[in-house]
Amino acid sequence: MPKALQPHPDRALPAGEARDVARRIHASTKDLPLLCLHGHVDIGLFATDAPFGNPAELLVVPDHYVTRMLISQGISPDRLGLPRRDGTAPADPRDVWREFCANWHLFLGTPSRYWLEHEFAEVLGVTTHPSAEAADELYDQISARIAEPEFRPRALLDRFGIELISTTDAATDDLAQHAKLAADLPGRVVPTFRPDALVHLDRPGWSVLASRLGELANVDTATYDGFLAAIRQRRQAFVEAGARATDHGHYSAAAIPLTDAEAARIYTSALKGDVSAEDANAFAGHMLYQSAVMSAEDGLVMQLHPGVLRDHDPAIHAAYGPDQGHDIPVATEFTRSLRPLLERFGHAAGFRLVLFTVDETVYSRELAPLAGVYPAVRLGAPWWFLDSPDGMRRFRELVTETAGFYNMSGFVDDTRAFLSIPARHDLARRIDAGYLANLVVQHRLDEDDAFQVAKDLAYNLARDTYLS
């Protein structure tokens, strides 16, 4: 007989005498609106508002948490539906779904299991655990459910209680889909400016992107000054489209300015195709500093999440392209790297820098002290490998005593998996409820204060960080 799927109402809450307090705190936040201001959901979902294709395309193929676990167990990306660069037809979606269900046990103890169970039970109304035996039944049940009008992407914005969601868009995106949405859903879905591909001069295809930037901005990018002017123009276009933030995924946190002459020399070399790796890295750090200059001018919140070695497996990159989940964290240094930027902008009115990391070793040593001294700095929510129950709990334990609660950004999810958004916010609210409840039963925090802090962490701090 298939095993029933019924997430426990006290999941992720603490045991012992703190549980009753945590239940009350969580109840006070669970229905607050969601602010999703560090997201990567495909803008096309909302622009077209088409029905989701099938369960595999919705829940497996685009979710790197899911595919990387299956690949780690020796399952070929081809069997998981990842599209190949050579145009080879991907696996049949039903076969992908069967592979996923047959390996459901691999997700035991992972945040993916938590989010998927929430999605199945509370979003899709699924009451049976995935398994090889139940795969086809579940596929048909979910397919029928997502074909219903109330499961269109725009309808789910209301059902999930999403007040505002941001997408992440290249600086060279023409924002046409956002223009359509601005007319259909004003102020509900906004872009985020991501210039990474333009500031790393040694990446393949960079010169083509620089030309595209110039075309969109109507600025000649044959010079460094023109390049800066074009970046400013595109930022303004994003501001006019409703953007609230920029997003920077550099390998290093280094934000060290060059002289104009040196920056121009490196830029000119890149246009000629002979830029060195050392110069390209220096230019990327320089442009991170310049991004702060521009954020101080136009008010876009600057989000930085360094410290990941992208596309670690060259064979996967060659066959399936970039950003397939084969990205591995590396040790990251913030204190010296950000000092030039913070010397100039750390106390500047109107400038805000949100710092994310996947290197837990810097939480208490660097990030909490930086946020504890510079008014411009906020600590971003635990990100990627750390947006898990224990990862979130460790974050609170390591940063709160130094930075307090009010130097945080609040919880903002970081996902491409649209249906997991309410699960992620719910998990964060449960972990914060448990953390605060423990402080209450230890008589380190009044219960009234705990209720207020919980609401601030769930909603008010995100609004203050990105929308004030």
Image: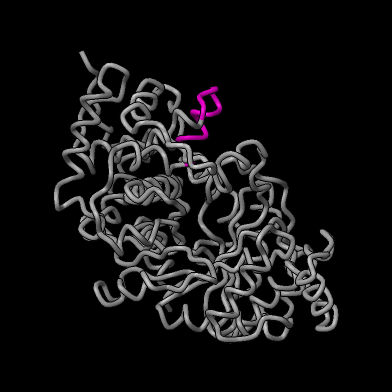
The correct choice, above or below, for 14 with respect to 439 in the image is above
Give the left or right position of residue 294, taking residue 39 as reference: right
Decide: is 2 above or below 367: above
User: In the orientation shown, which residue stands out farthest toward the top?
Assistant: 1
Drawn side of residue 419 relative to residue 204, left or right: left
Residue 411 visible? The answer is no
Residue drawn where x is 55% and y is 67% of the image: 194
Query: Left of 30 or right of it: where is 311?
Result: right
- Residue 298 percent location from the top left of the image: 54, 85
Counting from the top left corner in percent of width and height, residue 266 is at 82, 73
- Is 71 inside the magenta-drawn segment? yes
Image spot of residue 289 (x, y percent):
70, 74
Instruction: Check the picture and name the quadrant holding the N terminus.
Output: top left
- The rendered magenta stretch, by its main secondary structure, is classed as helix
Can residue 423 be seen here? The reply is yes
Q: Where 312 falls versus 289 (above or below)?
A: above
What is the tally of numbered marks visible in this picture?
Answer: 0
Residue at horizontal 23%, vertical 28%? Answer: 138
Foreground pick, 392 / 41: 41
Seen from the viewer's position, the closer of residues 413 and 309 is 309
Magenta region: 64-76
Q: Nearer the viewer, residue 92 or 31?
A: 92
- The x, y position of residue 459, in whole percent, is 37, 64
Q: Is residue 249 left or right of residue 280?
A: left
Q: Quadrant of residue 466?
A: bottom left
- Residue 34 lies in magenta, yes or no? no
Quarter of the rendering containing residue 3:
top left
